[in-house]
Image (cartoon, helix red, strand yellow):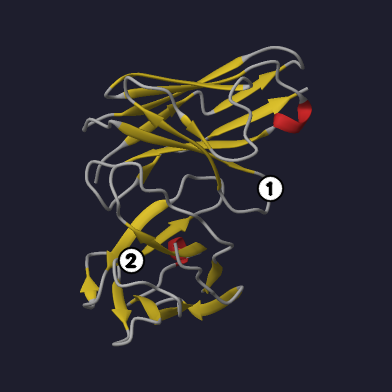
Amino acid sequence: GAVVSQHPSRVICKSGTSVKIECRSLDFQATTMFWYRQFPKQSLMLMATSNEGSKATYEQGVEKDKFLINHASLTLSTLTVTSAHPEDSSFYICSAGPGPHEQYFGPGTRLTVT
Amino acid sequence: DAKTTQPTSMDCAEGRAANLPCNHSTISGNEYVYWYRQIHSQGPQYIIHGLKNNETNEMASLIITEDRKSSTLILPHATLRDTAVYYCIVRAYTGANSKLTFGKGITLSVRP
């Protein structure tokens, strides 16, 4: 099946710093990618829809100035968590699909803010 | 998108079939049924999807009732590696921005 990668897989940062997470579609082009966040023992919550060449669409309650999304190419979307705080510690997951139905998810990035 | 209801958890013996139910009584005519699973600390994995007809692939079978108000995902020969949270999602495909909304899913535990 199609492959989506994420980098880094784990990151620890200090409160107040920014962290960038990359999401790549390795064997297909993706005009749209999705970013999710998952807290322990909870389900995935969609944060935003990333569109190549245009602004991302954020879900209600997600601060666009805090979670910056850039979808600069058909195979790469980045999520930057700015001025990170301990409550931003979470599992961040991206997804993309080569077609209308199957979505392929990255392996996730575990962010810990100290 | 229509809401789905799944049991919280179930278990089955290794080698036996696992039948995971899902209710979606408010499903609309243009909404598909999707199944994903998430193994602990990994990203979700696409399993299968269907609209009206039953579907089968190398991973599983999807049985959709004639009225489309419920469905069952069948793992024919469960293995320990099938232990995961399984999500049943209903979604209308309206373009590339069509979103998947995850509920709580059902935790399947496969026992030796």
Q: In this orientation, which residue lies closer to the viewer: B67 or A103?
A: B67
Q: Is residue A72 visible?
A: yes
Q: Could you tell me residue A5's position as x and y percent?
A: 38, 31
Mark 1 crowd level (few <14, some 14–19, many ≥20, 10 Å Cα): few
Q: Chain of mark 1?
A: A
**Residue at horizontal 70 percent and vertical 30 percent from the top:** A88
Q: Quadrant of residue A27?
A: top left
Q: Is residue B16 visible?
A: no
Q: What element does badge 1 sit on?
A: loop
Q: In this orientation, which residue lies closer to the viewer: A10 or B44?
A: B44
Q: Quadrant of residue A62?
A: top right
Q: Quadrant of residue B9?
A: bottom right
Q: Amino acid at mark 1?
A: Pro
**Residue at horizontal 28 percent and vertical 30 percent from the top:** A31
**Residue at horizontal 22 percent and vertical 71 percent from the top:** B56
Q: Nearer the viewer, mark 2 or mark 1?
A: 2
Q: Could you tell me residue B112's position as x and y percent?
A: 51, 74
Q: Which mark is residue A2?
A: none
> Label 2, label 1: how many angstroms apart (C-alpha)?
30 Å
Q: Which residue is mark 2?
A: B31
